[in-house]
Amino acid sequence: MSSQPTAVERRLRPRRISASQKQELVIGAVPYAILVVLVVWFGYLQPASLTTEQVLLSVDLALVLMLVAVGQTIVLLSGGIDLSVAGVMSVANAIAAVYISTSDRAVWISLALVAVGWVPGAINGLLIVVFRLQPFIVTLGTWFVWAGVAFYVLPTAGDTVVDPGFASLANGATLGVDNTLWFVVGIAVVGMWLLRTRIGVEIRAFGADPIAAALAGIRTNTAIVVAYSASSLFSVIAGLLLVSQNLSGDPTVGDKYLLSSIAAAVIGGTSMFGGSATVVGTIVGALVLGYVARVTFAVGLPSEWGLIFAGLLLAFAVALQGLVRAFVGRRR
Amino acid sequence: MSKAADGQIGTTAGPGSAAAPTLAAAEQGPPRAGTLRCLDVTKRFDTVVALDRLDFAAEAGEVHAVLGENGAGKSTFVKILGGTLQADEGSLELFGSPVSFRNPRAAATRGVSVAHQELSLASELTVAQNIWIRHAKLSALGMLPRRSINRRTLDLVKRFDAPSIEPDEKVKNLTVAQRQMVEILKAIASEPRVVVFDESTSALPASETEWALGLARRLAAEGSLVLFISHRIREIRQVADRVTIFRNGAAVRSAPTEELTDDAMVEAMLGRKPQTLYSPALVAPRDDVHALAVRNLHGGRLRGIDFDLREREILGVGGLQGQGQSDLLFGLFGMLGSSGEVTVYGKRRRIRSPHDALAAGIALVPEDRRLQGLLMTKTIRENVSLPNLARVSRGGFLSPLRELALADDAMRRLNVLATNTEQNVSTLSGGNQQKVVVAKLLELNTLILLLNDFTRGIDVGTKADLFQLLRELTAAGHSIVFYSSDAQELVQMCDRILVLRGGEVSALLSGSQRSEENVMRAAFGLDFGDATE
């Protein structure tokens, strides 16, 4: 096969993008558009919010959610749902809060948690695959179990004061760049890489059309187990990072992130039916939700307004995606 | 036309395509050691025996057609071969060694590849990803390399002379015919030693069908075994060296294609002499009563359609694929937001939703009975009740007795073969499923039936039954619009044939004008007449 395209290849190449690809591009742009509008609007109200420091603070607020949401996205892509992220994140948070007392231990405990972080997800995946159970029920069950474990490890929130050195994980800088940004880039790279590997493509295939995927001979069971494993790994890192941000633990902290993780994924363009999602979309979705919380706080509204606003935004984003599907680049 | 496939082989560049060795396998006399052999293969589902001690043998280098009615065991056979199902008893031998495939991967590893009838494509993946997901060389980081699989897809298209396809397009954006082609390309991409074309041509338009047939011949010429499953005898004649006919889960006859006449094939499939396969009108349409009069219908692909449907008439709708035939049915059923004048029995009707259509006595039998026509996990009774809930309810509650009576009536009316009304529709044969679809609509006092590709995936024997059924319906006063992609079917079934082209009526064929050739000519916008040439 020569490197120069032959006449046939040239003939087969697209001259322009198809209507459907155009539609996808526009839908993909929805979360970015929302984020830009939010940032510009708030920047107009409060010009001080546009300084580097303030922007970083916003990213900081969204970072933990971003981790959980990217994990959730991978599971949603497989056509499932992972409720256990809440419990798993709480357990990681509790363990880190209780046992990290010196910087020395912090490294080992963090590494150990990350090393076994995939196990709860693998259990979910195996339960789903082996017993052919529904993801919703399985992860609801394991959510409760891990939530209980979290209480066992850390009965009440905020009791423990973690070694302050651990804060540098979330708040420090590496090579002159804020760690927060490294995390965002890391999440994006790892997530995008995973979805481009064969198993990632298999997860997408299974999520889109489970029966066709099985007929095509892809490793459907492996795909499911890997998707849930990845999700719980992301949740564990999120729980760990949250301790570094707050320097204290909370055995119920994961519950707050569960529904937000789904919301972030959906705002980012993830289909709840499976088969369609992007990592960067979800990251932007998390940034949008983080920003909404921050704006509400900054303009002095009580936090319940943040929830209402976030809910409206979720509905708006989904409606916008639907409108694009109906009206942009319609064929025929 | 029948020589086109051979011609195509001649034009394809590639090894082993110099001559079409049509009779390669037949000339070798009785089968040799056996590329593929099945010995006493039995498969049961609960009490139903799908395969009953099946013996089967086929050789590399031949296109081997498998023919049989629905329920004869072809699909089960293909599934066992492809690793989707496992045999209960008996053995499978590939190149002389016994094999048993636990899953499709195992089959593919041993060189058995299936182009599935129901397609094995993931709609959210691109064409190239679907084709290469299992055997692409991964990049250093374990990723599926987009550029290289796209290029390999184009290579594959070029090598097999396939109609052009965009490798980076997601499968969900392809037409049914394009998907079918991707399914075929995917099956042959791994260079398998045994390829199964499982009704691969049933969703393809004529030119792509020629391509697929040529491809089957070429793969055989290059040394593969091609199993070709089809309901179209003409295609089998065109492509297959040998035919094995299944009946009731066993192979009842296997012979070189040219030794079997059409009648012999049908006889072997049915296990009896064929009667007239297609039934003539029992009662002539009434010229003076128009069940339906349509004027200037627009919407979707339609650009001003006029026609009348006489009472008791079966009006065929034909043409090349995608010329507005489905839109015509959808438009009449209120699913398109179409505009135009629709008159039902002399009364103007505004049909803006399926609800309006049903109220006007118009019902649509959808093309995909499994997805659109039936709730596959429910019983006959539940399926019949669904559109008739008002009739089977009392004071807002379902009345079990009324439901039963209605389902019983529906079953008896169309002679549905089932143990009782509580049988799950998924366990019925294709023909009987189709009867349930019609039966539940008839209970709505439907006058006009719109049939969308009514006989898709229905075998010859059942087709005759269904046609007889349609004739009985017209005799009972119903009028039918019958869309089919099969011109032969239109000619043999319909009183008149409306041929669409580019969303307009290209011809209305009646009387002696009705011929396959005229349908084709009108579909291509050519002149036509009573003469044969």
Image: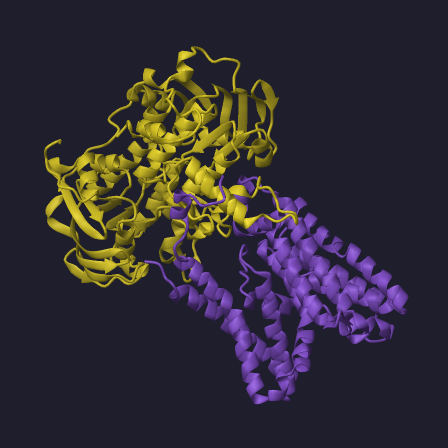
Chain colours: A purple, B yellow
Work out whether residue B313 or residue B102 is closer to the camera in this orientation and state it: B102
* Percent of width and height locating residue B254: 41, 17
Q: Is residue A190 above or below residue B151?
A: below
Q: Position of residue B428 (x, y in %)?
A: 43, 37
* Foreground pick, B210 / B42: B210
* Residue B210 location, quadrant: top left
Q: Is residue A231 visible?
A: yes
Tell me the quarter of the image containing the C terminus of chain A: bottom left
Outermost residue to the top: B29
| Labels in figure, total | 0
Tell which of A155 and A77 is nearer to you: A77
Instruction: Decide: is B12 above or below B434.
Output: above
Whether residue B445 is visible, yes or no, is no
Taking B335 as reference, is B153 left or right?
right
Q: At 37% from the left edge and 22% from the top edge, which residue is drawn?
A: B19
Give coordinates of residue B386: x percent, y percent. 40, 53
Image: A149 above or below B446: below
- Residue A286 in the image: above or below residue A273: below
Locate residue A52 relative to residue B192 in the image: left or right: right
> Image quadrant of residue B65?
top left
Name the side, left or right, on which A241 lies relative to A331. right
Q: Position of residue B315 (x, y in %)?
A: 20, 44
